[in-house]
Image (tube, rainbow, N blue to C red):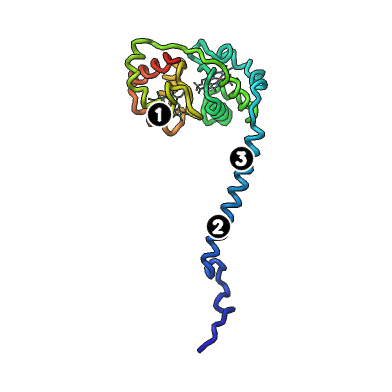
Amino acid sequence: MQPVNLNNRYRGRKIYNVFPELRGIVMQLTTKLLSGIFLGLLFAGSALAAPDINAGKENAVMCFNCHGAEGNSTNSNFPTLAGQKPAYLANQLRAFRDGTRDNGMMKNMTFSLSNEDINNLAAYFSSLKNKSAGGNEELAKQGKSKAPMCFGCHGNGAKGMGVTPRLAGQHPAYLQRQLHAFKDGTRKNGPMRGIAGMLSDEGISAVTEYMGSLK
Ligand code: HEC
Ligand code: HEC
């Protein structure tokens, strides 16, 4: 019998090929280590990012010119921000700043904001009381039947949920423009493109008048 020559047998072969189970163990350890570091960063990040409503209020004065006193807009060119969800507000402000949501005015307003400024502004506007813009009664009645499919993501009564915005009390004309923008792809968002695509122009008018009429 030939003695097994370990040196020859293992030479030139990766250690993982020789001990396949080792690869699994190393991968598991790496994953554990990385997720530990990740969680650590996440907690450190959220501790730093505790929003300062008063700092947000100071910066917000320049927003009132367009978005109305205390974020309740009286002009449908400008959305109401009062009572909007903070995570949604922060997401949109970053999107305007980074150019993933395209609007010249809002680009100018956000390009110099830090993430901290953004979180403070979002906390401030979300703390304010929303004054409903109201909607056309006849159309609102027609739109009501479509609303349950919106509530699933936008929350009961469309009051908003996390990164999904409050629609209740928002200017119908503003909501209409956004739905058309989702539909033609000028505003990019996965679920809303498909949903807006399912609505006719009449459907869009009706459902947005209904949302605007909610308090
Ligand atoms: C010169 C006018 C103007 C000023 C000043 C302005 N905005 Fe805007 N803002 C707009 C317009 C117009 C839109 C709608 C953009 C669109 O149609 O996509 C908008 C949209 C937004 C949105 C998106 C709301 C939503 O429901 O999606 C947020 C958030 C916002 N602005 C926050 C702010 C904040 C915070 C400030 C102050 C730092 C500010 N804006 C100052 C004009 C302005
Ligand atoms: C699958 C979840 C989902 C459903 C269902 C849904 N939405 Fe949305 N909607 C979203 C998300 C997420 C956003 C935020 C998009 C972004 O971050 O740009 C949004 C944004 C919007 C906006 C923009 C609001 C603003 O302030 O700019 C409008 C308008 C809107 N939705 C209307 C509707 C209507 C009307 C319905 C029902 C016919 C509906 N959505 C159903 C998830 C959903």
**Does 36 appear above or below 167?**
below
Q: Can residue 214 be seen in this view?
A: yes
The crowd level at tag 1 (other Cα within 10 Å; few <14, some 14-19, many 20+) is few
Mark 3, ligand 2, within 8 Å: the answer is no
Circle nearer the N terminus (3, 1): 3
The residue type indicated by label 2 comes to Met
Q: Quadrant of the C terminus?
A: top left
Front residue of 69/159: it is: 159
Mark pair 2, 3: CA separation:
22 Å
Image mark for residue 27: 2
Residue extending farthest front? 156
| Quarter-of-image position of residue 95 | top right
Q: Which quarter of the figure has residue 145? A: top left
Q: Helix or strand or loop: what does disc 2 sit on? A: helix
Cβ at disc 1 under 8 Å from ligand 2: yes
Asked whether the residues under the numbered discs 1 and 2 touch, taking CB atoms below 8 Å apart as contact, a structural biologist would say: no
- Distance in Å between CA atoms under marks 3 and 1: 29 Å
- Residue type marked 3: Leu
Residue to which mark 3 is pinned: 42
Q: Which of marks 2 and 3 is nearer the N terminus?
A: 2
User: For this rendering, which residue is in front, 176 or 53?
Assistant: 53
Which residue is at 45% across, 18% downward?
A: 168
Res 113 seen here: no
Report the disc number at residue 152.
1
- Give the residue type that dot 1 points to: Gly
Q: Position of residue 16 (x, y in %)?
A: 54, 66
Residue pictured at 62% horizontal, 35% vertical: 46
Q: Is mark 2 within 8 Å of ligand 2?
A: no
Q: What element carries label 3?
A: helix
Identified at 41% across, 12% down, the residue is 135
